[in-house]
Amino acid sequence: MGQITVNVNNRPYVIACDDGQEAHLTRLARYVDQRVGQLVAAVGQAGEARLLLMVSLLLADELSEAYEQSKRLGAGMEPSSDEALANLLDRLSQRIETIAERFEQA
């Protein structure tokens, strides 16, 4: 079992994870920290629990938007079409990479 320490809003958190997942969780934590930083810049420090709740809601909104977009992209797609599925996954991957790049630059 792996273990990492991540920082969110300048506070360290020790997280247990499966072996080999350390880098992935570190990237996710950086993304969450960036979103917290953006929220703090917009509304100021609002208490740790409240900030994490607000960021969780923002991330859930992004996920919901991506899910809805995937449904729109997949509308009318034959379930058995491997090529159509590959195209859908490629578009979703590009969307995720675009979002990640936007936050890495922030």
Image (spheres, rainbow, N blue to C red):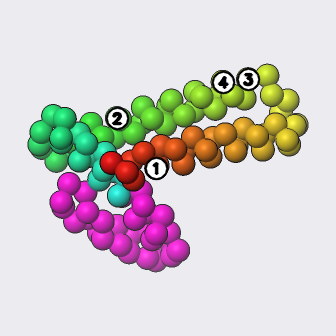
Q: Which amino acid does label 1 sit on?
A: Glu
Pointer 1 residue: 101
Q: Which residue is drawn at 25% across and 42% down?
A: 38
In the rendered structure, find residue 72 and report the number of the disc placed on it.
4
Q: Residue 44 at what x, y percent from top left?
A: 12, 39
Contact between labelled residues 4 and 3, with CB atoms less than 8 Å apart: yes
Q: Which of marks 1 and 4 is nearer the N terminus?
A: 4
Q: Residue 13 at what x, y percent from top left?
A: 26, 64
Q: Is mark 4 on a helix, strand or loop?
A: helix
Q: Distance between the residues labelled 2 and 4?
A: 22 Å
Q: Residue at x 18, y 41 (%)?
A: 41
Contact between labelled residues 2 and 1, with CB atoms less than 8 Å apart: no
Pointer 2 residue: 57
Q: What residue type is labelled 4?
A: Arg
Q: Does the magenta stretch include residue 24?
A: yes
Q: Give the range drawn in magenta.
A: 1-29
Q: Distance between the residues labelled 1 and 2?
A: 20 Å
**Which image quarter: residue 52?**
top left
Contact between labelled residues 1 and 3, with CB atoms less than 8 Å apart: no
Q: Distance between the residues labelled 2 and 3?
A: 27 Å
34 or 6: nearer the eye? 34
Contact between labelled residues 3 and 2, with CB atoms less than 8 Å apart: no
Q: Which of marks 2 and 4 is nearer the N terminus?
A: 2
Pointer 3 residue: 75
User: What is the crowding at mark 2: few (fewer than 14 residues within 10 Å), some, or many (at least 20)?
Assistant: few
